[in-house]
Image: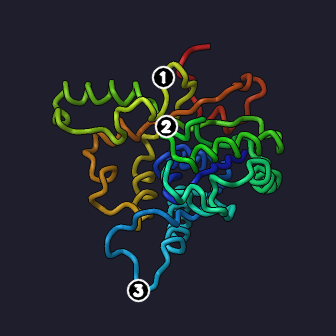
Amino acid sequence: MGTIVSFHAHPDDEAIGTAGTLARAADAGHRVVLVFATRGELGEPVPGVLGDGEQLAMRRSAECFTAAQEIGAKRVEFLGWTDSGMMGEPTNDAPYCFWQASVEHAARRLAVILDEEEPDVLTVYDDNGGYGHPDHIQVHRVGMRAAELSAVPVVAQGTINRDWLAVGRRRLVASGQIDGAATMPEPDAPNWGKPETEITHKVEVVDVADRKRAAMRAHASQMGPDHPLLAMPEPMFLVGLGVEFYIVRPEPSPAAASDVFLDLFTPLRPG
């Protein structure tokens, strides 16, 4: 059996983006490790969820371990930078935020964990961080460099398949499964995700959708019962979050690919 390390910007990113992939990996007997760049200090807590004097960073850190248990992860680590906030906010300039971190220094810190775990696959985000968040962009930069330092054989860049969402929504409306006014999880905007032509692999996670939801619910400080992702009708959830998409370049040859990669990742196009 092998190991997959999943690198994320903030607590709850793992639940939304890769929880299905990781749950499937754990079910297949592979070791799953989660690494977070920050503790999500600048998240917006659900009103009334925090106790008197409770720090959001501490709550979100604890939620990571609950979500990890749902997914089947065996190790959770934090690199120690602070949340940078959304792109263009003054918090991007804070000296200890992840956006301001030296890529080389942060990559060396991540590489220590990678050297210990010797993963077959590392997941990061695409070069735009999925939707342009500075910490997500930095995860891409730091993760790609750390993979070089530790000679990780496969880096899978998690992304959003814009075309899949558009087609899926049209089909759900046409079949009457959702109302025409319903919206998908992500805005139909060109800076979200990638066109399908740039995506190489997918992981079908419908069979572990309940585990993915449980991981999302574990992040209760950020995702209450009425959160749009949790309140979606079942057909929409399975279209929007039931398949996780990745960019894998270069792709390993079948002869050299690990069991982790072969067990999980399906090419979008033959050959």
Name the residue at 40% across, 41% down: 241
Q: Residues within 10 Å of mark 3 (few under 14, many from 20)?
A: few
Task: Name the disc covering residue 52, or none.
Answer: 3
Q: Which of marks 1 and 2 is nearer the N terminus?
A: 1
Image quarter in which the N terminus is found: top right
In the displayed structure image, the side of residue 267 where residue 216 appears, left or right: left
Name the residue at 66% across, 54% down: 100
Q: Amino acid under label 3?
A: Asp
Asked if residue 202 is positioned above or below residue 54 in the image, the reply reads above
Q: Amino acid under label 1?
A: Glu
Task: Name the disc covering residue 244, or none.
Answer: 2
- The residue tagged 1 is 196
Residue placed most toward the observer, 49 or 20: 49
Asked if residue 160 is positioned above or below residue 122 in the image, the reply reads above
In the displayed structure image, the side of residue 175 where residue 141 appears, left or right: right
Image quarter in which the C terminus is found: top right
Name the residue at 50% across, 49% down: 88
Q: Is mark 3 on a helix, strand or loop?
A: loop
Q: Amino acid under label 2?
A: Glu
Q: Earlier in the sequence, mark 2 or mark 3?
A: 3
Task: Name the disc covering residue 241, or none.
Answer: none
Q: In which quarter of the image is residue 260?
A: top right
Residue placed most toward the observer, 243 or 52: 52
> Given contact means CB atoms under 8 Å apart, are the residues at marks 2 and 3 in contact?
no
